Amino acid sequence: MSTQSERIGRLRAAMNDGDLDALLVSGSASVRWLTGYGGSNGLALVTQSRAVLFTDFRYADSVEPLRQELDVEVVDQNLVGAITPRLAQLAGGAVGFESNQLTHAAWSLLGASGAELRPTSMLLENLRAVKSPAEVELLRRASHASDQIYARIADAGLAGRTERAVAHQIGDWCRELGDDASFSAVVAAAENGGRPHAVARDVEIPRGTLVVIDLGVRIDGYHGDCTRTFATGSTEAEHKEVYEVVLSAQQAAKGLIRAGAGCADVHEAAKRVIGDAGYGEFFKHGTGHGVGVEIHEEPRFRDGLGGTLQVGNAVTVEPGIYLPGRFGVRIEDLVVVDADGYETLTGFPTSLLDVG
């Protein structure tokens, strides 16, 4: 069975559970995951007997290979407008739609179809959260590429270079080792590291400080995500203390990762270590998130979120402490849940390295 056929089969089973005759898939990441279509304008309609990809004339040639796995229709660029008059006939009953992806304008237009529209929530996202062995291998390759980049950073050193220059170099390496960067690299030295989502500045990295670097390489549509914090020469005692607290928090969170573990429990483990050390107010983001065809997917380690881990979940573990105006520390690994617990895909050392 092909990858696309297997995924469509899983979706049909989920549709049965939700008493849906059809599902309109509009989120670009889910369309790509389900059909293999990588263009900018696509919708998929899945029933129990058909799976149809709708796109426009710009992609008429590129979608030809997909006809081996599903029906393809080339229609007007306004895809929703093109399928609305036919939706009730194509679906044959209750039509689910992605409530967090479909715009209000598109929903209003589809309402004129006469079809029974039913909102769904996280149906595709939950399917995507369980990775196949082939998907895990792509994430493993992306993570290995990240490891190579960190090794190059350690060899080249950081002090005296601007944050922006290092970020640009990382982008070039991502394109050399993969298809592209998963996101614009974070390079944040000294007080800039006290911002969880810092933007690289045209400012030289000084000696005697910490530098937070967050990067990812995309390979065949799958993202890597890894953060390391480096020292540039001799650092203060508090730098090392905070670093060890964050590392202990990550180890505590990892220690709970296994199939059946509560996502909230993993987050709480990291929070507890940081809070007990007196830095609780400086850790306000989640401990991690799923990674796949999107850089942020399900499941998520955050306050107030339920759910349990399953074999095949690929998630980051990334606690941090951010002292405003002073410095920050974040350590992030990408792990995949397996039958024995978990496998860490990122392999670059998590000890505090002085790279000068």
Image: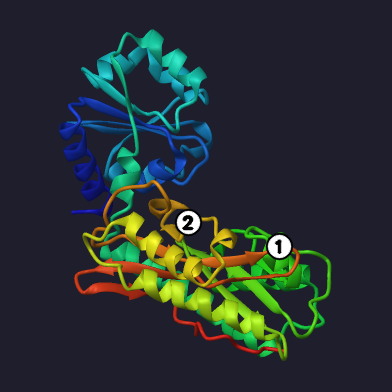
Residue that carries the numbered disc 1 in the rendered image: 324
Which sits in the foreground, 315 or 90? 315
- Write the residue at 45% across / 72% down: 249
Q: Are marks 2 and 1 in contact (CB under 8 Å)?
A: no
Q: Position of residue 170 (x, y in %)?
A: 65, 72
Which sits in the foreground, 54 or 333? 333
Report the mark closest to the observer, 2 or 1.
Answer: 1
Which sits in the foreground, 238 or 266? 238
Callout 2 amino acid? Gly
Which numbered disc covers residue 124? none
User: Could you say whether the residue bearing mark 1 is in a helix, strand or loop?
Assistant: loop
Q: Position of residue 299 (x, y in %)?
A: 36, 53
Give the side of residue 2 with respect to residue 212, left or right: left
- Write the residue at 20% across / 30% down: 18
Which sits in the foreground, 56 or 279? 279
Is residue 41 visible in the rendered structure shown here? yes
Mark 2 to mark 1: distance in Å?
Answer: 18 Å
Give the side of residue 195 with respect to residue 179, left or right: right
